[in-house]
Amino acid sequence: MKKVVSVIVTYEPDAAMLGRLLDSLCPQVAGVVVVDNGSTADVGGMLAEMGHDDVTLLELGWNQGVAAAQNHGLTWALQQGSDAVLLMDQDSVPAPDMVSRLLAAWQDCLQRGVGVAALGPRYVDERLSRNTPFIRSEGRRLVRVACDGPEKVVAVDYVISSGCLLPREAIETVGLMRDELFIDYVDVEWGLRAAGSGLLSFGVCDARMTHRLGDDPIHFMGRSVAARSPRRHYYFCRNALLLYRQAGIPLNWKLLDAWRLLVKYVFYSLLTRDRLAHFRMMSLGLWHGAMGRGGPLRVRR
């Protein structure tokens, strides 16, 4: 049986949501470490009140970003002798059999001699009322795999970090996350970097998870669109350009992603509340990305 240790990154977590996550996750893995990114809340006290004294807490003291927090957790988990590490966000809740289904898919890949970078579950944001399909690039188009056919495991360019199972060998081959990205595109960059090393990422159709994507959704022309704050859109735009500058990223992926980025830039600049703030922060992100600037956004006082 493979030993799986889970890493949960927290920042000002909601106690009820964190409790749901831990209640579902802890029975599925050999250990859990919570890496807290400088929350003002007493996360240790939360864990004690929930009865999860067996969960290890690493307090970073200040917000070092998702990538750096994941790296602290990955390093700790590997030191515990884990065969694989499961990354989780604080606003996700896995199905009771999610980990076992990810492990079964991994075992199948091993038997077929396939090098695995990462395996991720299907997730649904209950506020959007729809399943989120897996996405992969094929030539000049993006293919959305809705898992409504016979395929149980589908090859993808990357999987989102929450619910992502990373084999030890993949982490040791590919390396840790790029902490200068801070937040957004961290999982994308790692998945594409892994592909450059000959390792593949897979979406596992029968592994399930609920996950909150961004803030409360925007309702537009009968559709629900995931929303983010202007500050998050800064990182989204900046990190996209940082990836476009990175050697080894496939050109077709850059072109496809750049088109999606342009659509989002226009949509959030013109059709959302606080559109001017979104426009300014996204434009600043594009400028900083073009200049190669990483790390946390430092606001002048």
Image: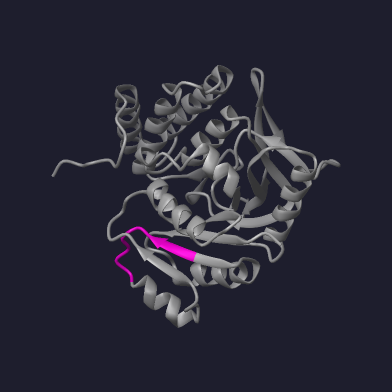
For residue 265, above or below residue 89: above
* Quadrant placement of the N terminus: bottom right
Q: For residue 183, which quarter of the picture?
A: top left
Number of numbered discs on residues: 0
The x and y percentages for residue 239 are 40, 32
> Is residue 89 at least partly visible in the picture?
no
For residue 52, above or below residue 107: below
The x and y percentages for residue 108 are 78, 47
Magenta-tinted stretch? 33-41
> Is residue 17 at least partly visible in the picture?
yes
Which residue is pictured at 74% across the width and 39% down the height? Answer: 154
Q: For residue 208, which quarter of the picture?
A: bottom right
Residue 10: in magenta span: no
The x and y percentages for residue 252 are 58, 18
Q: For residue 100, which quarter of the picture?
A: bottom right
Residue in front for this viewpoint, 199 or 44:
199
The x and y percentages for residue 235 are 37, 38
Residue in front for this viewpoint, 150 or 269:
150
Which residue is pictured at 82% across the width and 41% down the height? Answer: 151
* Quadrant placement of the C terminus: top left
